[in-house]
Image (cartoon, rainbow, N blue to C red):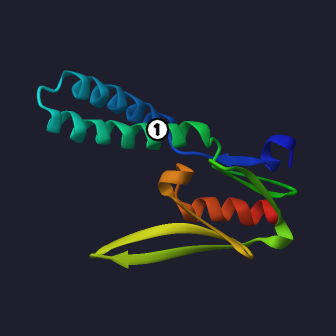
Amino acid sequence: MNTAEQSMGWAPPAALVGCGWLLTAGAATWAFLASTPTDRVFVGVLALALLTASAFGTICRPRLHADATGITVRALTGRRHYSWDQVTIRVRETRRLGLTGTSLELDANPDLMVLTRLDLGEDPYAAADVLHALRR
């Protein structure tokens, strides 16, 4: 394996984050142009929620990074690195309201990181396969 193959990163899709920023700009413009105070408050809260989600998607890139030494998970509070012997990797499927959701669980006792397809930009099963391959 060469150096490029020994490390991998996952992040929310850039196109999705870009759409979030466009929607944030649109909602902020709508809030500015709204004619009633109720509309301004409602759309202002929407713009703030979109701003928060878009900023998170931009700041926390890559959300997960793995290499020969272990994994690094990035959040708003900073980065946390865990060596391979600290981490248990599993994919969990949950069923709610007739829909099945898949998530990647990284258990580094006492920390539990749950990453979805949205966090990874890829199917959690595929990410788990790569993590298991890097772990060896």
Is residue 136 among what the camera can see? Answer: no
Indicate the position of residue 120 as horizontal and vertical percent values: 56, 52
Q: Is residue 39 left or right of residue 31?
A: left
Secondary structure, mark 1, is helix
What amino acid does circle 1 point to? Ser
What is the total number of numbered labels drawn onto the structure image?
1
Residue 84 falls in image quadrant: bottom right
Residue of label 1: 54
Does residue 13 sit above or below 98 in this rendering?
Answer: above
Report the residue at 80% width, 41% height from top.
4
| Residue at the outermost front position | 37
Location of the C terminus (image quadrant): bottom right
Residue in the foreground of this view, choosing between 29 and 64: 29
Left or right placement of residue 136 versus residue 66 in this view: right
Residue drawn 27% across the image and 23% down it: 29
* Badge 1 density bin: few <14, some 14–19, many ≥20, Cα 10 Å: many
- Decide if residue 44 is on the left or right side of residue 109: left
The image position of residue 115, as x and y in percent, is 56, 61
Tell me the residue at 82%/72% (across/down). Answer: 86
Q: Quadrant of residue 68?
A: bottom right
Whether residue 126 is visible, yes or no, is yes
Residue at coordinates 63% horizontally, 41% vertically from top-left?
A: 61
Vertical relation: 95 (above or below) 104: below
x, y percent for residue 49: 38, 43
On the picture, is 72 further left or further right than 93? right
